[in-house]
Image (cartoon, rainbow, N blue to C red):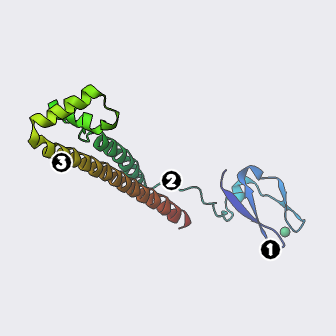
């Protein structure tokens, strides 16, 4: 849409006309037909206020938006990485096997139960250390899962704040 010019009518109203309407007639709200002058004269008339065109995002808003996107990506990746790097509950070697058997003690067969029993008999100190090791591993696992969740949520929150700021500043910029 090109720029419009205000064509005064005898009734006092001003009609917005475009350059392409030069030399024609326009009807005013009062019912009177007003002749639109030729282009040379038309362009000397008062210009109609431009309708506010959608403002493009400023540099700051763009940076905020990019920050939000980056935070979102980094947050997701970090959470997933933390989740993946969790210590395995499996303890290597014979104690690991015993721990595995121990955790499935409900569904153990006779041979496995005997092996577990023999293991405990052979290494009495492990009977105390092993459950503690398993417990601490489970606790660490739970703590890391929680940490990953909190971290992910924090990043999500930060990115939301960035998005909100970017959008709000866009709206503020629009009204001024
Ligand atoms: Zn009129």
For marks 1 and 2, give the CA distance.
Answer: 37 Å
172 displayed left or right of 20: left
Label 3 C-beta lies within 8 Å of the nearest ligand 1 atom: no
Q: Residue at x 40, y 53 (%)?
A: 156
- Residue 8 x %, y %: 77, 68
31 displayed left or right of 109: right
Count of numbered badges drawn on the protein: 3
62 displayed left or right of 92: right
- Name the mark on residue 53: none
- Residue 63 x %, y %: 38, 53
Can you tell which quarter of the image residue 154 is in? bottom left
Q: Residues within 10 Å of mark 1 (few under 14, many from 20)?
A: few
Label 1 C-beta lies within 8 Å of the nearest ligand 1 atom: yes
**Which quarter of the frame holds ligand 1?**
bottom right
Foreground disc of the pair 1, 2: 2
Q: Residue at x 83, y 71 (%)?
A: 10
For marks 2 and 3, give the CA distance.
Answer: 60 Å
* Disc 1: which residue: 12
Q: Residue at x 20, y 33 (%)?
A: 116
Give the answer, above or below, for where 14 lies relative to 65: below
- Residue 88 x %, y %: 24, 38
- Name the mark on residue 56: 2
Residue 125 appears in view: yes
Give the answer, above or below, for where 17 lies relative to 93: below
Q: Residue at x 15, y 43 (%)?
A: 127
Callout 1 touching callout 2 (CB < 8 Å): no
124 displayed left or right of 68: left
């Amino acid at each position: 849409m090109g720029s419009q010019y205000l064509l005064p009518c005898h009734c006092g109203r001003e009609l917005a006309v475009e350059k392409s309407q030069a030399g024609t007639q326009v009807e005013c709200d009062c019912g009177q037909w007003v002749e639109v002058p030729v282009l040379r004269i038309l362009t000397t008339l008062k210009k109609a206020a431009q309708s506010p065109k959608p403002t493009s995002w400023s540099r700051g808003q763009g940076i905020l938006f990019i920050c939000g996107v980056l935070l979102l990506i980094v947050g997701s990746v970090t959470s997933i990485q933390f989740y993946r790097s969790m210590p395995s509950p499996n303890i290597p070697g014979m104690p690991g096997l015993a721990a595995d058997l121990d955790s499935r003690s409900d569904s153990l067969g006779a041979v496995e139960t005997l092996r577990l029993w023999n293991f405990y008999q052979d290494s009495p100190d492990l009977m105390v250390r092993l459950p503690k090791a398993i417990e601490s591993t489970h606790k660490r696992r739970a703590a890391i899962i929680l940490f990953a969740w909190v971290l992910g949520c924090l990043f999500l929150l930060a990115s939301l704040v960035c998005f909100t700021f970017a959008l709000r500043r866009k709206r503020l910029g629009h009204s001024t």
